[in-house]
Amino acid sequence: MNVLKKLLGAALMVPALAIASGTELHLDRAPLSTEPANLQNGAKLFVNYCLNCHGASYMRYNRLTEIGLTEEQIKDNLMFTADKVGEQMKIALRRDDGKKWFGAAPPDLTVIARSRASEFGSGGDWLYTYLRQFYRDPSRPTGWNNVVFENVGMPHVLWELQGEQHLKAHEGAKGHGGAKTLELVKPGRLTAEEYDQAVADLVSFVVWMGEPVADKRKTIGAFVLAGLAVLFGLSFALKKAYWQDIH
């Protein structure tokens, strides 16, 4: 029995030791927005920069009317891979080709924010940090690497907007817990503040795309809780009135 207890205790300690031995991942807080203007800009960035390799096959173009766009605007400005506004946001890239070119097939991004949330607590924060942490790395096939996702196969598709960053590795960076900072050596078309806002809009759209009815669900939830509170009060008053002669 004592041996069994020791083995069980050692097994429970393994995950804690694994976490303690790894490098802590710092995520920046994403300034997410549900304003139509921000979501529309995010949709534009998504279609122009992401919807080449990554699909969003659980989303249909006509759902973009929910962020304030008309079907005519969608057709004229955002539909490059489909003919009908009711079609899914799919791409022509085959998974086998993607795996051959990038080392892994680019994932579908419809619910990527929700997927990362299950791993890191906030999918929006992870995406916002990730898209701002690319740096030049000649040793990688694409010429790019990422602080958040080391040795990622994805190139920095937004580099013309952000510019080129180089890694400044401080002492201990190659070990556990070492600090890594990035230095902008070649500015892009946007300033640092403008690029951060563009990424925030893009991530806001991706988060919205993962659950378009999130705001409606929260509103309905608030009304349901308010209704339950009223029913609880009425039920309590009814109970008091029913049992008043007994007590």
Image (cartoon, rainbow, N blue to C red):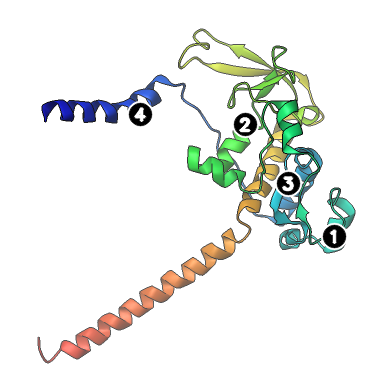
Q: Nearer the viewer, residue 216 or 99?
A: 99
Between the residue at mark 4 and the residue at mark 2, the CA separation in whole angstroms equals: 25 Å
Residue at horizontal 55%, vertical 10%?
170
Q: Is residue 247 above or below residue 39?
A: below
Q: Residues within 10 Å of mark 3 (few under 14, many from 20)?
A: many
Which of disc 1 and disc 3 is earlier in sequence? 3
Between the residue at mark 3 and the residue at mark 2, the CA separation in whole angstroms equals: 16 Å
Direction from residue 137 to residue 213 in the image, left or right = left
User: In this orientation, does residue 121 appear?
Assistant: no
Which of disc 2 and disc 1 is earlier in sequence? 1
Q: Is residue 41 above or below residue 239?
A: above
Residue at horizontal 77%, vertical 27%?
159
Nearest to viewer (mark 4 / mark 2): 4
Direction from residue 173 to residue 69 in the image, left or right = right
Q: Which residue is identified by label 3?
A: 42
Q: Which residue is identified by label 4?
A: 15
Q: Which residue is identified by label 1?
A: 84
The amino acid marked with disc number 3 is Gly
* Residue 142 x %, y %: 74, 21
Q: Which residue is identified by label 2?
A: 130
Which of disc 4 and disc 1 is earlier in sequence? 4
